[in-house]
Image: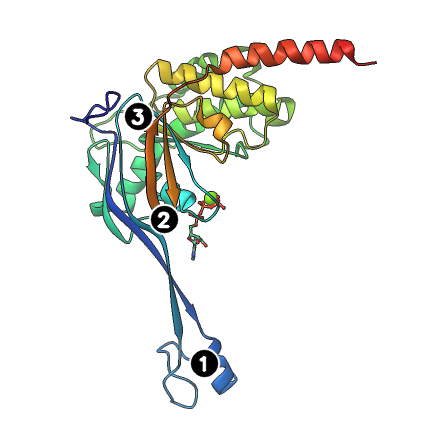
Amino acid sequence: MERETINAALPVIDMRGIKREYRMETKQNAKIKDGGLPKKDGALKNGAPAVIDAVVVRALRGVDFSAGAGEFVSVMGPSGSGKSTLMNILGCLDKPSSGAYTLDGIETSKSNSDTFAYIRNRKIGFVFQSFNLLARTTALENVELPLFYRRRLKNEERQNAASRKERAMAVLKEVGLEGRMDHFPSQLSGGQQQRVAIARAMVNDPAFILADEPTGNLDTGMTLEIMGLFQELNRQGKTIIMVTHEPELAVYTKRIITLRDGELVSDELVAKRQSAPDDLSRWKRDHALLSEQAP
Ligand SMILES: Nc1ncnc2c1ncn2[C@@H]1O[C@H](COP(=O)(O)OP(=O)(O)OP(=O)(O)O)[C@@H](O)[C@H]1O
Ligand SMILES: [Mg+2]
């Protein structure tokens, strides 16, 4: 059955048979026999062939995954199941050992490093657990940065300083930080810092936002605020892929894919989607009641 939310004609993300193997060579045997590391060609100093153990870690074992515009997907799975490996490939930070990955119509496996850099700058908005903002740079300047380093196609015009500033101000407003543009990261709460990072992720109007444990460093209130912001951006049509360990956060998304031992073992729509703003109001009310009761 076709998934309703997927625009099957034009998926933003289309992965087919994605495998990623890490080959780890251990030179233990060689060391023991010769008392030293083998030379570059693998032969030992005394000329004997080295005994090199090769261990292949199969981090992804043939993943098929496709997501259309407007989806909000959680990537879940136990530690070591391949989530970061999948994120790195989705984010064009790494290439698969085999398989095909098409992003917004671009077949990435045939792309060179310039195209990869273009894709990372223009097609993907990254949001990390640790915000990754520049400390000595204001909120506005942090958001302007991807525009400053904007990768352009041959016939595209360069943006001038005024239009960069205007665009950065507009996205900061979208994330509710119009009053904090000149603040440095240290002058902002964790939740506000993550809002700046989300504004920075959106400033080039990417094909999708890739968030890796985006609320991992935030308390409950700020977590719900950020999830509410993601829900609002998604309602406006933004495509979001989010890695999370926490099932209670996945219920704010629309779809959950689960990895286990490098395989995609389940892919389901969230049956009872929760509203983060509603949960935030409830949480604030309960919290206020608790502090009133405190001695
Ligand atoms: N650079 C690497 N070299 C060798 N093996 C690796 C490398 N990176 C990851 N692995 C292995 O690949 C598997 C998947 O790792 P990955 O980091 O994708 O898991 P994960 O789901 O992100 O785990 P976690 O929830 O702990 O972050 C693990 O067995 C890991 O040990
Ligand atoms: Mg990981």
Say which residue appears at 34% left-offset and 41% top-offset: 265
User: For numbered disc 2, what is the local secondary structure?
Assistant: loop
User: For numbered disc 1, what is the local secondary structure?
Assistant: helix
- Measured Cα–Cα span from mark 1 to mark 2: 31 Å
Nearest the viewer among 47 and 140 is 47
Where, quadrant-wise, is the N terminus in this rendering? top left
In the rendered structure, which amino acid carries the disc numbered 1? Answer: Ala
Say which residue appears at 37% left-offset and 78% top-offset: 42
Left or right of 162, for residue 184: right
Q: Is residue 36 visible?
A: no
Say which residue appears at 51% left-offset and 23% top-offset: 196
Nearest the viewer among 67 and 116 is 67
User: Which residue was labeled with disc 3?
Assistant: 158
In the rendered structure, which amino acid carries the disc numbered 3? Answer: Arg
The image quarter containing residue 13 is: top left
Where, quadrant-wise, is the C terminus in this rendering? top right
Where residue 84 sits in the image (x, y, percent)?
42, 44
Where residue 188 sits in the image (x, y, percent)?
62, 22
Say which residue appears at 59% left-offset and 27% top-offset: 218
Label 1 vs 2, first from the N-terminus: 1
User: Which residue was labeled with disc 1?
Assistant: 30
User: Which residue was labeled with disc 2?
Assistant: 262
The vertical placement of 55 against 87, above or below, is below
Left or right of 136, for residue 103: left
Where residue 5 sits in the image (x, y, percent)?
26, 21
